[in-house]
């Protein structure tokens, strides 16, 4: 069952504004698969004179014939001619298309893989224009290829786009509505498994509970998402073996480049390029202690950014042999023993993400980070959340806990004890906040936030 069209209001408005211009436009839409690019396009193009074509792996002659049939819906008889090459087909389209017509080429990288000349041919017609208002929309899931075809300085279409929209997963705040969940806590738990990808939500919503969805969609070897990470990596990487190995190690708790390299039997210096590539794709993120610049690599930790991929590499990847032996039920039992720990890591991320959107203590706060290091007593310590006020005069220190029973009073006492031992707070006003699964608790000494308040601002 398809979800109702959620969010995407800004992207939709920008798409429609581009297509309403009185001059020819080129619009580019790209991003991770299953995030709703095609659906957004169809929504934006509704009611327009549009030729919408999805590229595939067939030979060029077959794709030209299929595209000609689509173009014939706007230009009668267009498909009655055999087009020996792409240049002839595009030339006729630009000559005969009515003003305001839209040529939308979805999965554009697949089309170009069979015909490398297409970007240059499109560039020629876009540049000449002929004074006629013809719109072109290019969309694709391969971020690497879309960058190379449109965003790279050497690409024929570089600098021609009027709009370049990157579509990512939806924010966590939409999870409850998408899955029809009754509580915000259940929405956080669901987000920790499925992330913000609309198609994953559609698949999960067909089942009565999270356990059933997990077992049938993800753990079952025949499940739709059982091998999903392989497809995601293939979209953007020529060699997926090293990337999958790195993600597997990060998923099992190796977060430093030196640890990852040692487990792979490689020098640490060889990790720079593959880690940078995964960073560029948004698959992993780089965590540094609050106040430390990312270039301080000795204190950098790498983590899987997306909740779904984090879950997959933590639970599915190491259990693939058992799952192939159809032991889904026993694997699910094992997962449930530590699932709250996994949800807790996602809850910490959501707590930090919520800080700039919450007006905590009637102040605005800059983005929050975790902090770890050596305390005044020379012992290692960690604080889940540290943020600086917009004025720069105050620090916000916070802890995020996902246990069912979290007492704010002792947690606040522990946080204040950490503050006294933290070198960051010297000479600064300190504010305290807690993010608890149990929700808001009345205390004058700290702000306490629960899933309802966090998800409300994360939309």
Image (cartoon, rainbow, N blue to C red):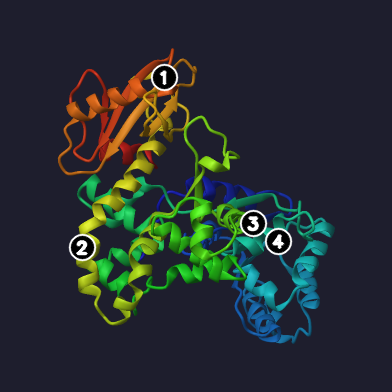
Q: Residue 360 or 100: which is nearer the viewer? A: 360
- Residue bearing the label numbered 3: 28
Number of residue marks: 4
Residue farthest along the front direction in this orientation: 378
Nearer to us: label 1 or label 4? 1
- Do the residues bearing badges 4 and 3 touch, measured as CB atoms within 8 Å? no
- Do the residues bearing badges 1 and 3 touch, measured as CB atoms within 8 Å? no
Please report whichever mark, 2 or 3, sits nearer to the chain's N-terminal start: 3
Q: Cα distance, mark 4 to mark 2? A: 42 Å
Residue 245 visible in the snapshot: yes
Q: Please tell me the numbered disc located at residue 425.
A: 1
Please report whichever mark, 4 or 3, sits nearer to the chain's N-terminal start: 3
At label 4, counting other C-alpha atoms closer than 10 Å, the crowd grade (few under 14, some 14-19, many 20 or more) is: some
Q: Secondary structure at mark 2?
A: loop
- Residue bearing the label numbered 2: 209
Q: Cα distance, mark 2 to mark 3? A: 38 Å
Residue farthest along the top direction in this orientation: 427
- Residue bearing the label numbered 4: 148
């Amino acid at each position: 069952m398809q979800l109702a069209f959620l969010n995407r209001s800004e992207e939709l408005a920008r798409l429609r504004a581009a297509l309403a211009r009185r001059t020819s436009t080129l619009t580019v839409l790209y991003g991770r698969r299953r995030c709703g690019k095609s659906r957004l396009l169809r929504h934006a193009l509704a009611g327009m004179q549009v030729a919408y074509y999805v590229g595939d792996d067939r030979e060029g002659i077959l794709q030209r014939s299929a595209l000609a049939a689509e173009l014939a819906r706007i230009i009668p008889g267009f498909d009655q001619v055999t087009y020996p090459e792409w240049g002839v087909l595009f030339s006729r389209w630009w000559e005969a298309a009515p003003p305001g017509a839209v040529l939308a080429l979805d999965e554009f990288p697949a089309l170009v893989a069979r015909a490398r000349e297409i970007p240059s041919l499109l560039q020629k017609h876009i540049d000449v224009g002929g004074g006629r208002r013809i719109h072109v929309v290019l969309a694709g899931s391969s971020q690497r290829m879309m960058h190379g075809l449109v965003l790279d300085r050497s690409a024929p279409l570089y600098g021609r786009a009027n709009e370049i929209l990157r579509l990512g997963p939806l924010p966590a705040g939409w999870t409850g509505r998408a899955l029809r969940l009754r509580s915000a806590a259940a929405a956080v738990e669901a987000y920790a498994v499925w992330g913000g990808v609309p198609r994953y939500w559609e698949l999960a919503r067909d089942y009565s509970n999270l356990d059933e969805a997990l077992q049938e969609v993800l753990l079952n070897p025949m499940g739709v998402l059982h091998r999903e990470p392989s497809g995601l990596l293939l979209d953007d990487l020529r060699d997926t073996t090293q990337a999958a190995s790195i993600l597997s190690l990060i998923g099992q708790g190796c977060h430093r480049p030196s640890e990852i390299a040692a487990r792979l039997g490689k020098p640490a210096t060889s990790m720079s390029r593959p880690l940078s590539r995964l960073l560029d794709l948004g698959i992993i993120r780089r965590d540094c202690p609050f106040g430390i610049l990312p270039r301080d690599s000795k204190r950098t930790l790498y983590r899987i950014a997306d909740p779904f991929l984090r879950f997959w590499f933590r639970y599915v990847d190491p259990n693939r042999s058992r799952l192939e032996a159809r032991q889904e039920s026993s694997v699910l039992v094992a997962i449930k023993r530590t699932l709250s720990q996994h949800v807790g890591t996602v809850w910490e991320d959501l707590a930090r993400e919520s800080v700039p959107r919450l007006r905590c203590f009637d102040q605005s706060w800059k983005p929050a980070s975790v902090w770890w290091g050596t305390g005044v007593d020379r012992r290692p310590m960690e604080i889940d959340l540290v943020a600086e006020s917009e004025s720069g005069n105050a620090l916000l220190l916070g802890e995020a806990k996902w246990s069912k029973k979290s007492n704010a009073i002792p947690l606040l006492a522990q946080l204040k004890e950490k503050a006294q031992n933290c070198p960051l707070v010297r000479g600064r006003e300190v504010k305290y906040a807690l993010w608890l699964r149990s929700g808001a608790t009345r205390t004058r000494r700290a702000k306490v936030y629960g899933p309802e308040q966090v998800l409300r601002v994360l939309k």
